[in-house]
Image (spheres, rainbow, N blue to C red):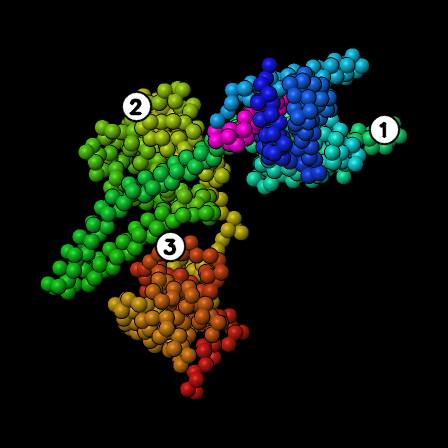
Amino acid sequence: MPSDTAITALSGLLSDEGERITRLWAKRLRAETYEVEVPGRDLRAPLHHLLDELARLLRDRGEDAIRLWPEVVRSHGAFRYDQNFEPEDLTREFKSLQEVLLYVYARRNGGVIDADVAELVSELVWEADASAQASYARVLKTEEVRFREAAVMESVLNHVEVGILLAETDGMVSFASPPVSRLMGVPMRAVVGARATSSLSPVLTQVNARHPTGEPFRVQDMPFLRALREKGPVRGVMMVVERPGGSDATLEMSATPVWEEDKVLAGVIQTFSDRTEAAVKTKALESAHDEVRRLQGQLLRRTRQQALGQLASGAAHALNNFLNVLRLRITLLQREYKPEHVEALDKTVRQIGELVARLQEFSVQRTEERLAEVPVDQTVREALELARGELEQREHPVHTELDLGFPWGVKADAGFFRELIVNLLLSARDRMEGGGTLQVRTRPEGEGWLALRIEDGGPPYAVEELARLFDPLRRDPGAPQFSLFLAVARTQVQRWGGELTVENRPDGSGASFIVRLPRFRDTAQDVEVSLPPSAMAPGGVPHLKRPARRVLVVDDDLDNARMMAEVLGEEGYDVQVAHSPEVALRIWEKHAFDAALLDAVMPEMTGWELARELRQRSPQTLLAIVTGADVRGQNRASLALVDAVFRKPIDVGALDEFLTQRRSEEEPTEGLGAPDPGH
């Protein structure tokens, strides 16, 4: 039996600290049962009532309180049943009461808990728990007897993986199966029997509910509320919630309206399904897909960079040869002037210009193809010249044997076609580690087709390897980008109406890459006026202008500007030089010019920007860009500002032909330049 001292001490504690004990008990209970704060719902009220009754019994009945208090608690079990508590929730509730009572008693007594008081608290709590559990079980048993079918359904719903929620037409949640609480991660008892607009908001906040995109999930986004508004089914709404342990769960929700026989809306059924595993797998697949695309991009860049790096050696070799010829010719000129030396110098400069132009065309980042007639045998020779240094400057050089017999053209993009041949040559070289001879053949095939064969001396391919050679995701430890290059190249050739294949040579000495393309057929629509390419407008159409006698040369390189002025002066032009765009604009305002030759790259303002300024001042004046770079990176608006683009080194004959072109007869030939302010 508890001592009178313990009863008095506990009675005094409840009288003095009742409010505090009630507050701490409610707080601990909420944490233990994941209870959600719902506006208008007081969790403390039933707890306060129990503690008031216990204090009264201890004060008035002494030791009989241990026997009488469980009777007071008995109705509490039935009350918690109505609130959808589980039996284990009741146990946690009274265990929390014991912890709070001992905690407050210890703080009041300097951290010391009297053994008799602890025994009294334990006896009171567990007697109350037993009474509440008995009452809960009695109500449950009665309910099972009275509503056996409902109990069976409750049992089924408790074990299926799909949660079910029922909502009335006014938005009140009338039922939620146990899986709903498990899936949401918090008990839904606070929501059942209340309007969703007020009771669901705290639940969604507590579980950090959000859309898969990261936006907060609002109460109005719930499918059953949307179904009530829209009077129709709502499918596949995804929601991400945070479980008590910190992990995320992805739920899929759908809502279906329920109609009475007279087509009156009775309510809505909403289902909850766990799609966490599927969401994780989907995310993993998306991540893997993004990684594959990233790797493909890297491989494509690596293929191009490797080809450009390999070509650099060959280009340097060719340029060094040209420069050596220049140096020797200049030495001879210094000793004795002979016209043939000058002609040889001019020829060598043209060859250097052609080589640089081919390199620029190869390296430019093209975004669209420009189909035209491409001479096959000539393009093969150009590609071989670009790759020759890389082919021959190795420990075991690869020599090339040409057998060209296709003097016609094919319809393709010239740069892409040359790049394709270079890459095939370098790929064939990689298969010939010991060196050898690489054979390149062009022949007509069938009715109007080209067959370009590149035959290497490497090991023949295995049958299964041939089948997988064009697989872009094939893993080849030696050259992992090779199959990706072949897949891209084959698609490219197919766009031109042809095919790219590979086969082992009949004698077993290597493999052959074969490009087949239809021969170019000229039609009346394809015939164009033939003019020097360097004097063509950016769009490929010649601008017919009147004779231009007064010319402004704008170039920040003094030597280039002076040489241009000297050459044009000897041709009979009146030339003025400006060494910066700022000076050019000042001169332009003071004098009338028939034409301007603008360097493309200058520090203060590009030639394209200067052309825009000059075009606004003098719309009818001839404007040309002079550049050593490829102009295909320029947008169409910039190209439309000028009448021609000249590549360095400049063909003086083409430049003179451009400046002396005339407009049609009916157009005026005078006064087309900018007005001279001095006149």
Residue type of the residue flagged with mark 1: Glu
- Looking at the rendered structure, the secondary structure element under dot 1 is loop
Q: Which is more N-terminal, label 1 or label 3? A: 1
**Crowd band around label 2 with a 10 angstrom C-alpha radius: few (<14), some (14–19), many (20+):** few
The answer to whether one can see residue 320 in this image is: yes
Q: Which sits in the foreground, 540 or 83?
A: 83
Q: Is residue 634 left or right of residue 565?
A: right
Residue type of the residue flagged with mark 3: Asp
The answer to the question of whether label 3 and label 1 lie on touching residues, with beta carbons closer than 8 A, is no
Label disc, if present, on residue 630 of the rendered structure: 3
Q: Nearer the viewer, mark 1 or mark 2?
A: 1
**Crowd band around label 3 with a 10 angstrom C-alpha radius: few (<14), some (14–19), many (20+):** some
Q: CA distance from mark 2 to mark 3?
A: 40 Å
Q: Position of residue 12 (x, y in %)?
A: 60, 29
Q: Look at the image and give the residue range highlighted in magenta.
A: 90-111
Q: Which is more N-terminal, label 3 or label 2? A: 2
Q: Position of residue 600 (x, y in %)?
A: 37, 62
Residue occupied by mark 1: 260
Verify whether residue 212 appears in magenta: no
Label disc, if present, on residue 454 of the rendered structure: none
Q: Which secondary structure type mostly characterizes the magenta part of the structure?
A: helix
Q: Which is more N-terminal, label 2 or label 1? A: 1
Residue drawn at (46%, 61%) of the image: 638
Q: Which sits in the foreground, 509 or 561?
A: 561
Residue type of the residue flagged with mark 2: Pro
